Image (spheres, rainbow, N blue to C red):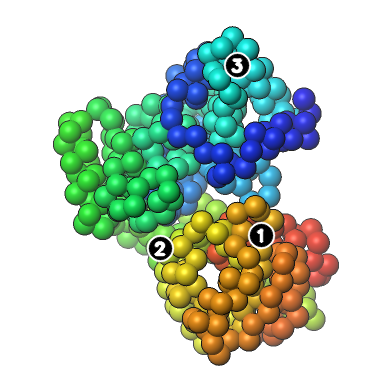
């Protein structure tokens, strides 16, 4: 298969969040048929609700600063599925992705043909296997794996990581993980196994008790990470990144990485789409766009805090689109009042919430804001640019990583705005 064939095959398996099949049997059989590539390197698994990806990229940057060969697996992607698999800081090439996908597809097909599986593994199970096989073939020393959903039954758990991190836990994906914080925490804390090293961020008390109990059950003493080194510089924006950095530092120390490499790695770490600023350098068309994939109330709170700190006196044009299965009312109550103008839209996903529903929320939570409705992200960002004074105002895009990815691609390749974005 070439890259187009590979992506078409993977996406034909169904939308990853609409065809979730929690459980380890499929991925374990698939990995076994591939020769258990996950046994050829050490692994760190990072679970939690918010900050998993940021913590993962920080740790990856730290490890590379220390001279450790790494594979980084994160999700979802913004623009290309290749973003999910990084080897020594670089996205896997399209050609290599296609080659490994071909191998994994053949193994999956054989499992079905032999009757070991009733149906093909899911999109996420396939891509997890692709990542682990690619890491083995690249000869990485350490794989850093962001948990997709939960932990107990997530495909990344099959890697058997010896070091585990847990970032802040809050309500999200209740339809799969449970309706209470304790139930969700139990699913995520299940990644803590006997003889693992565990680094945990500060947690709500209900979640903390569940995690502590899990540690006691498996005989593990947790490291509770809450502070970072003095005078550390973070490239990632937002005070909430201090919590993620504390977990990354704890994980790095568990890997016996020296302090100077930790400081250097934290300063260099970047995470596209998370409070990422795009700014045109053309004085005739000055545009500032802040992209942030906040997709639940806790993420929205962190973003709102950053906006109030960094852009307190700056009028904000909010471009917002969200998935229907998210806590959109709560997110709207947090973000909409901060905006002078709101452009509502629908990301290109079958899960997108219709703008008519968003309009009701906007009128409820920001009755004084100027409101526009669009049905696609390109129209939304163009409308926002048209009504925003780039010299003294800012456009803030949030609500869904799908929306952020679409807008980010438009800014990079289709905007027609002269100048550089950074």
Q: Which residue does the image show at 50% across and 82% down from the upper left?
A: 364
Q: Which quarter of the figure is the C terminus placed in? A: bottom right
Residue drawn at x 63%, y 65% as measured from the top left: 354
In the rendered view, tell whether residue 270 sits above or below residue 131.
Answer: below
- Which is more N-terminal, label 1 or label 2? 2
Residue, disc 2 = 298
Q: Residue at x 55, y 82 (%)?
A: 363
Give me the C-alpha separation between circle 2 and circle 3.
Answer: 41 Å
* Location of mark 3 (residue): 112
- What crowding class fits label 1: few (fewer than 14 Cα within 10 Å), some (14-19), or many (20 or more)? many
Q: Position of residue 113 (x, y in %)?
A: 63, 12
Q: Which mark is residue 200?
A: none
Residue 292: image x %, image y %?
A: 55, 63
Quadrant hosting residue 387: bottom right
Look at the image and tell me whether residue 322 can be seen.
yes
Residue 221 in view here: no
Query: Above or below — where is 316 with respect to 382?
Result: below
Q: Position of residue 80 (x, y in %)?
A: 68, 45
Q: Left or right: where does residue 60 sit relative to residue 8?
A: left
Please identify the quarter of the rendering in which residue 87 is found: top right
Image coords of residue 174 (percent x, y): 40, 51
Above or below, 249 against 11 in this view is below
User: Where's the N terminus, which quadrant?
Assistant: top right
Residue holding disc 1: 347
Circles 2 and 3 in contact, beta carbons < 8 Å: no
**Most foreground residue, 15 or 245:** 15
* Quadrant position of residue 4: top right
Q: Residues within 10 Å of mark 3 (few under 14, many from 20)?
A: some
State yes or no: discs 1 and 3 in contact (Cβ < 8 Å). no
Identify the residue at image location x=38%, y=30%: 161
Point out the frontmost of discs 2 and 3: 3
């Amino acid at each position: 298969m070439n890259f187009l064939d590979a992506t078409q095959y993977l996406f034909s398996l169904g939308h990853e969040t609409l065809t979730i099949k929690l459980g380890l049997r499929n991925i374990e059989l698939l990995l076994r048929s591939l020769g258990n590539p996950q046994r050829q390197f050490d692994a760190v698994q990072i679970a939690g609700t918010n900050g998993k990806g940021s913590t993962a990229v920080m740790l990856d940057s730290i490890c590379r600063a220390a001279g450790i060969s790494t594979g980084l697996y994160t999700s979802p992607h913004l623009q290309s599925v290749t973003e999910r698999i990084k080897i020594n800081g670089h996205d896997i090439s399209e050609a290599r992705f296609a080659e490994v996908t071909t191998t994994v597809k053949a193994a999956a097909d054989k499992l079905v043909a032999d009757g070991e599986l009733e149906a093909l593994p899911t999109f996420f199970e396939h891509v997890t296997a692709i990542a682990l096989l690619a890491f083995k073939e690249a000869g990485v020393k350490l794989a850093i794996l962001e948990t997709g959903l939960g932990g107990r039954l997530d495909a990344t758990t099959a890697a058997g990581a010896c070091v585990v991190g847990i970032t802040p836990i809050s309500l999200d994906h209740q339809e799969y993980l449970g309706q209470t914080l304790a139930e969700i925490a139990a699913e995520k804390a299940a990644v803590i196994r006997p003889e693992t090293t565990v680094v945990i961020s500060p947690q709500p008390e209900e979640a903390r008790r569940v995690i502590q109990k899990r540690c006691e059950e498996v005989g593990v003493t947790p490291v509770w990470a809450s502070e970072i080194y003095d005078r550390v510089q973070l490239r990632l924006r937002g005070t909430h990144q201090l919590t993620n950095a504390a977990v990354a530092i704890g994980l790095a120390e568990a890997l016996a990485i020296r302090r100077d490499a930790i400081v250097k790695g934290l300063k260099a770490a970047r995470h596209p789409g998370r409070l990422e600023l795009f700014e045109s350098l053309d004085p005739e068309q000055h545009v500032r766009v802040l992209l942030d994939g906040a997709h639940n109330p806790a993420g929205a709170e962190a973003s709102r805090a950053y906006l109030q700190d960094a852009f307190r006196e700056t009028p904000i044009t909010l471009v917002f689109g969200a998935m229907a299965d998210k806590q959109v009312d709560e997110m709207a109550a947090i973000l909409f009042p901060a905006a002078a103008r709101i452009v509502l839209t629908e990301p290109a996903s079958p899960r997108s919430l219709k703008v008519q529903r968003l309009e009701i929320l906007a009128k409820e939570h920001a009755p004084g804001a100027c409101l526009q409705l669009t049905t696609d992200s390109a129209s939304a960002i163009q409308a926002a640019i048209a009504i925003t004074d780039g010299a003294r105002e800012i456009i803030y895009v949030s609500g869904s990583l799908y929306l952020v990815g679409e807008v980010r691609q438009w800014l990079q390749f289709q905007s027609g705005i002269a100048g550089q974005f950074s």
